[in-house]
Image (cartoon, helix red, strand yellow):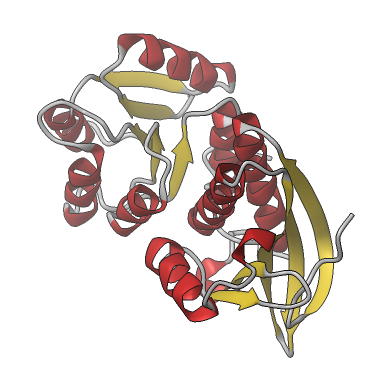
Amino acid sequence: MSDVHSPYKMRPPVMQVRVEDSMDIMIVRDTTRRAAGLLGFSPAHRAQLATAAATLAELVLKTGEAHTVHLNGVVDNIRHGLQISSETPWLAGRSANNVLIALKSKMGDLVDEILLEETPTPTIMMIMWLDDTRSDSQGGT
Amino acid sequence: MALEVLLVEDSKTQAAQIKETLESVGLRVRIAYDGPDGLREAIANPPALIVLDVKLPTMDGFQVCRRLKRNPATQDIPVIMLTEKAGPKATMSGLRAGADDYIPKDIFASEHLIDTLHELGILED
């Protein structure tokens, strides 16, 4: 299993889905909704996160290689959120700026942050932070 | 008395499947087969929840949702979009139109729908 990368401190939930075929995209979507629910995101924000994760999984699948989509709670001072990430070795040597422009154009509305860590293995990270407007009626974690 | 859901879905097969899911958790279901009919039904007899398809004849689900959320008679009714259009653009279009959730019609759709009914307080925990 590969290490999970994040610029933020990680916390539960910690989940992962191996993406090998199109069925796994549905599993990524389902798992992401559940992880977002555990953190207290509202249904609408769960939908956004699930779509972001499924889109990343589709991107992974198109490369023809199996990879893992990781879902982690993250903390930054007092705020917490959900990070979706996957190693993307096929991006090695590509312009990080161009990759980020393409990702933000496709998925920038779905999450708060899209990051590309270039070393040791290129890794795409997408994060949505939880706030009062994004919290479900039960008040989250 | 069971809460009533208005289901706006043009496919009779899919409408029957979704109706069965909703009835299995004790809800009553009324069906409209296109957008204008759904709007008329929602205004004439406001339901507790609207489950709305996106691909509809005459007026798509995004337009229906925007009109529901602009109308004082229907703006507070929760709307769940249940759809085959699952990409980033469609998801954001649905949520920006005012939908309370946007659920793709995949194998987990029934589970996600019921989870959201709990979250929205339509079903008791």
Give the residue furthest to the front: A93
Q: Is residue A93 visible?
A: yes
Q: Nearer the viewer, residue A86 or A53?
A: A86
Q: Position of residue A75 (x, y in %)?
A: 75, 80
Q: Position of residue A74 (x, y in %)?
A: 74, 74
Q: Quadrant of the N terminus of chain A?
A: bottom right
Q: Position of residue B44 (x, y in %)?
A: 16, 32
Residue under the point 52% across and 39% down: B122
Q: Is residue A88 visible?
A: no
Q: Nearer the viewer, residue B47 or B70?
A: B70
Residue under the point 42% across and 67% down: A102
Write down the quadrant of residue B124 in the picture: top right
In the shown orientation, is residue A95 left or right of residue A67? Answer: left
Give the residue furthest to the right: A1
In the displayed structure, would residue A114 be above or below residue B111? below
Q: Nearer the viewer, residue A5 or B105?
A: A5
Residue under the point 43% across and 20% down: B28
How many labels were placed on the picture?
A: 0
Residue under the point 10% across and 29% down: B58
Q: Position of residue A13 (x, y in %)?
A: 81, 60
In the shown orientation, is residue A99 left or right of residue B64? Answer: right
Q: Quadrant of the C terminus of chain A?
A: bottom right
